[in-house]
């Protein structure tokens, strides 16, 4: 209703809560409990960046252990206290760092930080809406995420340490207080934090779906939506359908941990405690519930990056995205298949072999829509006129990483190879490249591309270039050699390899990888400096549409207020990819279709 | 002190890079938007090709340095492993071709089609023919891999041959327990509440008539070269995983739910020592599922030996029953009486 009102201009509607009302905005309502989707997006982004720095720092610490298992660093003891007695990280601390690194990067950075930021920022701006369907729910979504963050952070300071059983939190390890110090109160905080996080992403997701379906401006049919919005739409659908399953899994875990139930527990004898009374549960049940979220989660992370890359690539190639409908169809196919492949994480759990074979088939099927996307991106570049903005570089980097990491997915998705490579460094290399670094690249591409819209200033280009080239080279230097470690069977989540005759030959390589990891981490600091400096002191944006882009967000003022458009919301007449058509460099979506225009889309 | 110094140096480097970047922004404003953009395009276009070339050189160097350290160079030690390796190479070739083609195109296009004022872009929004081609080709390639993969998968997970030697492996924090069924070839029943870490670490029910000849050890698992081995895998506490790198297999050890895996070793440990040139070579069982703080040290050893050596080893083993009840051991001198009390306790 308020959207309808907003469509007719805010001037005549004093009661309209969507129009922009700078008048009674205090610091608290503008920057803290803001209901403006753009501010909430920035809150998600900056919180995500804080977590990215913490998570990255954790990886530097545990890489230090892997690279220099015999060295001792006195400053580590001053930093970590009893977790690094004598300057050497203890196994407890190592596992806590690995676990928290995984949890934080997957959920807080690449889910909340990525889709929280860009879904909030881009959906209203690109579909032509004044704000989200429910700005209040949107605000709640951020504050649930914030609370989850605080609780996760506090778990780092618990006497017995944070949870240390891996981000997948498989019971019985995660269910038994006595199985590991990290499974004591650290785990309770971990579960509570994750539960709140699920609430946050549900509130966000429902909002995104409602906004995309109901609040598109006049003329913005579904097939005129930019691919970013389509990607964010499928992301939200995946999240809404799969996160509740994780939540239910977590609730059962809470029951097993604290109330003596046996959902996941059976026939257990814990050293030093004795036989437990639990019987009849199945530890594998949790894995089904977990991966029913866990696999769609991979695409929740990847799809927004794909969408933004499609958009940025088209804008900077000055050429329409190739195969819009095929891109959309492949997004849809990936979204459907994402729900049907979860058990490929469980090939070696004793899964029924026939069931395993079905999951092999469905898993490898995902390669088809993925291949379509890659070839379409390549064709988008072909005979374009490419502008190397930092955003574009990261988009190209994304495609490169997506190819490299995607192809090893074909190895791991085939059960007969997975039975060898499962839980080795091959897997570490695979998912870091295809999901971790690639999505990070999508996120960087988005930040570089939309920073002028967010803050009305540019990021420094030179720093952007330095950031890109060091990061992509570093990413390959870190993760490419890990495939070889995986092919030697080197298991992941090992604190030290020196006692293993089969795996100790990589000590030198581990040192190399750790060194590169530190350099890459240091380079990200460069990005942070660029980001925060440019918010306040960056070169000012002086034109409405600096990238000469077709989409609606560039029709708003340089620094849009709450409500986005000062006057009426513009009407849309065409799809967003008319670049290089009929001799025009670009034709914004708001331009009506000319009479002599060729009909293409 | 050195810490402060290194922090200062790092901070200094940041400041320098930042100042250069800042200066380059001013220069670009002076030179004009257009000129600096062209320069940026030249540099980044060049770097695109340089990255591609250096990348391929890097892959070559990496392969040269590390291929020899992987299992592939060593060769598989089981018939299953040989199939895995073969499949791995087929997959490598198919994905490798796709990798090279797509990466070359990506970076080459990026270089070739960098902005040029005189170029008119090709308005090319879609082509059903092209899209069909690159839907069909991956689909066909994947069908090949799926068929190949599933044949192996059903072989690996299928029934082992009748003559398989059955061994039970139980994981615990942080070690492995191996149990052999003894002369009767049947395992005695077990129940986890009977577990006593000193004498009955898997919880055998001693009343079971099949239990009393079961042989149990935590030292090493002995298997015979050329004879299939079937493992019955379980866990006492949390989930572990029997990772057999040299045989190219692994299977989780789940409390309460037994799993199985079988393989046929084709080289003895001694032969592998000669083959790899490593006198310390051992078939190691690595735990491949996060199981707690000692996860990284949860090692087991498999000794692959000839039938003769196996028989010799087996002859030396004493049933676990006699460890629990030393007075019943016919070869030992009966001493204490209180072990009967323990025996009745175990029955309860």
Image: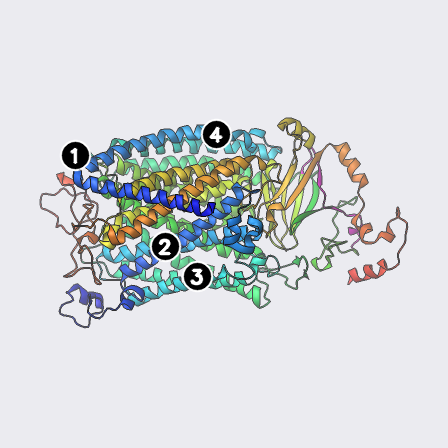
Alpha carbon separation for disc pair 4 and 3: 44 Å
Alpha carbon separation for disc pair 4 and 1: 42 Å
To which residue does mark 1 refer?
B117
Q: Badge 1 local density, few (<14 within 10 Å), some, or many (20+)?
A: few
Residue A25 appears in the figure:
yes
Say what secondary structure mark 4 lies in.
helix
Circle 2/circle 3 CB separation < 8 Å: no
Residues behind callouts 4 and 1 on a single chain: yes
Counting residues from the start of the chain, the first of labels 2 and 3 encountered is 2
Chain containing the residue with disc 1: B
User: Residue B297 in the image: x percent, y percent?
Assistant: 62, 46
Alpha carbon separation for disc pair 2 and 3: 20 Å
Say what secondary structure mark 3 lies in.
helix
To which residue does mark 3 refer?
A244
Counting residues from the start of the chain, the first of labels 4 and 1 encountered is 4
- Horizontally, is B269 left or right of B152 in the view? right
Alpha carbon separation for disc pair 1 and 2: 37 Å
Chain containing the residue with disc 4: B
To which residue does mark 4 refer?
B63
Say which residue appears at 67% left-offset and 57% top-offset: A271
Q: In this view, does A384 lie above or below A439?
A: above
Residues behind callouts 2 and 4 on a single chain: no
To which residue does mark 2 refer?
A113
- Horizontally, is B138 left or right of A416 in the view? left
| Nearest the eye: A420 or A530 | A530
Say which residue appears at 35% left-offset and 66% top-offset: A140
Chain containing the residue with disc 3: A
Q: Which residue lies furthest to the front in this view?
A: B1
User: Residue A524 in the image: x percent, y percent?
Assistant: 37, 46
């Amino acid at each position: 209703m308020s959207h309808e009102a907003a469509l007719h201009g805010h001037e005549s509607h004093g009661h309209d809560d969507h129009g922009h009302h700078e008048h009674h905005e205090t610091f608290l309502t503008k920057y803290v409990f803001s209901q403006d989707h753009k501010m909430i997006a920035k809150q998600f982004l900056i919180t995500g960046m804080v977590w990215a720095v913490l998570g990255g720092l954790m990886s530097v610490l545990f890489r230090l252990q892997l690279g220099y298992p015999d060295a001792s660093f006195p400053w580590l003891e001053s930093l970590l206290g009893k977790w690094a007695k004598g300057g050497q990280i203890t196994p407890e601390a190592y596992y806590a760092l690995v676990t928290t690194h995984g949890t934080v990067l997957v959920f807080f950075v690449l889910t909340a930080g990525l889709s929280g930021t860009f879904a909030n920022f881009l959906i209203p701006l690109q579909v032509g809406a004044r704000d989200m369907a429910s700005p209040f729910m949107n605000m709640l979504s951020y504050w649930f995420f914030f609370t989850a963050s605080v609780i996760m952070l506090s778990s780092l300071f618990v006497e017995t340490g944070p949870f240390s059983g891996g981000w997948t939190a498989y019971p019985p390890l995660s269910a038994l207080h006595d199985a590991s110090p990290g499974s004591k109160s650290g785990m309770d905080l971990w579960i509570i934090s994750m539960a709140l996080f699920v609430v946050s992403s549900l509130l966000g997701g429902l909002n995104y779906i409602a906004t995309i379906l109901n609040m598109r401006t006049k003329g913005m049919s579904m097939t005129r939506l930019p691919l970013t919005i389509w990607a964010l739409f499928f992301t939200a659908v995946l999240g809404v359908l799969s996160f509740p399953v994780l939540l239910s899994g977590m609730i059962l875990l809470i029951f097993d941990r604290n109330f003596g139930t046996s959902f996941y527990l059976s026939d257990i004898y814990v050293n030093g405690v004795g036989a437990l009374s639990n019987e009849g549960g199945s530890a594998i049940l949790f894995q089904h519930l977990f991966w029913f979220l866990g696999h769609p989660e991979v695409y929740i992370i990847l799809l927004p990056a794909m969408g933004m890359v499609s958009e940025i690539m088209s804008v900077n190639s000055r050429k329409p995205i190739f195969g819009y409908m095929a891109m959309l169809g492949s997004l849809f196919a990936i979204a459907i298949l994402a729900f049907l492949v979860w058990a490929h994480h469980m090939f070696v759990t004793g899964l029924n072999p026939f069931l395993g074979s079905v999951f092999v088939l469905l898993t490898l099927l995902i390669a088809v829509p993925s291949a379509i996307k890659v070839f379409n991106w390549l064709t988008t570049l072909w005979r374009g006129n490419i502008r190397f903005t930092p955003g574009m570089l990261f988009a190209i980097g994304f495609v490169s990483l997506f190819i490299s990491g995607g192809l090893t997915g074909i190895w791991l998705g085939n059960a007969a190879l997975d039975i060898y490579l499962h839980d080795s460094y091959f897997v570490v290399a695979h998912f870091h490249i295809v999901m971790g670094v690639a999505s990070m690249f999508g996120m960087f591409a988005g930040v570089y591309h939309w920073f002028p819209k967010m803050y009305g200033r540019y990021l420094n280009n030179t720093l952007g270039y330095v950031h890109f080239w060091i990061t992509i080279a570093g990413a390959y230097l870190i993760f490419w050699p890990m495939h070889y470690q995986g092919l030697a069977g080197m298991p992941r989540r090992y604190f030290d390899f020196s006692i293993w005759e089969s795996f100790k030959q990589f000590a030198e390589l581990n040192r190399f990888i750790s060194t590169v990891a530190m350099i890459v981490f240091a380079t990200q600091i460069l990005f942070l400096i660029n980001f925060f400096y440019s918010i306040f002191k960056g070169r000012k944006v002086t034109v409405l549409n600096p990238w000469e882009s077709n989409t609606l967000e560039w029709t708003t003022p340089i620094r849009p207020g709450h409500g986005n458009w000062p006057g009426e919301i513009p009407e849309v007449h065409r799809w967003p990819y008319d670049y290089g058509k009929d001799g025009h460099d670009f034709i914004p979506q708001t331009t009506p279709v000319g009479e002599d225009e060729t009909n293409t889309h | 002190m050195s810490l402060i110094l290194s922090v200062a140096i790092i901070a200094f480097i940041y400041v320098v890079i930042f100042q250069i970047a800042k200066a380059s922004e001013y220069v670009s404003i002076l030179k004009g938007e257009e000129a600096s953009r062209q320069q940026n395009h030249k540099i980044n276009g060049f770097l695109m090709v340089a990255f591609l070339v250096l990348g391929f050189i890097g892959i070559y160097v990496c392969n040269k340095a590390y291929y020899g350290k992987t299992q592939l160079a060593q060769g598989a030690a089981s018939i299953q492993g040989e199939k895995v390796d073969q499949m791995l190479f087929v997959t490598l070739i198919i994905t490798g071709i796709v990798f090279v083609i797509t990466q070359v195109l990506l970076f080459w296009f990026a270089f070739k089609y960098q902005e040029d004022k005189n170029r008119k872009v090709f308005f090319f929004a879609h082509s059903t023919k092209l899209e069909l081609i690159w839907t069909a080709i991956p689909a066909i390639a994947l069908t090949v891999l799926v068929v190949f993969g599933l044949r192996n998968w059903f072989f690996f997970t299928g029934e082992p041959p009748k003559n398989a030697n059955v061994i039970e492996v139980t994981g615990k924090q942080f070690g492995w327990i191996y149990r052999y069924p003894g002369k009767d070839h049947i395992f005695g029943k077990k129940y986890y509440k009977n577990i006593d870490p000193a004498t009955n670490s898997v919880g055998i029910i001693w009343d079971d008539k099949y239990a009393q000849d079961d042989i149990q050890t935590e030292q090493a698992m002995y298997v015979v070269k050329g004879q299939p081995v079937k493992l019955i895998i379980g866990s006492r506490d949390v989930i572990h995983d029997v990772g057999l790198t040299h045989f190219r297999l692994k299977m989780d050890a789940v409390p309460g739910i037994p799993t199985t895996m079988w393989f046929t070793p084709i080289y003895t440990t001694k032969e592998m020592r000669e083959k790899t040139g490593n006198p310390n070579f051992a078939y190691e069982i690595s735990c491949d599922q996060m199981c707690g703080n000692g996860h990284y040290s949860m090692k087991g050893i498999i000794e692959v030996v000839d039938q003769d050596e196996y028989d010799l080893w087996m002859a030396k083993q004493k049933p676990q029953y006699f460890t629990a009840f030393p007075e019943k051991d016919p070869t030992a001198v009966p001493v204490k009486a209180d072990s009967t009390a323990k025996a009745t306790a175990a029955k309860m």
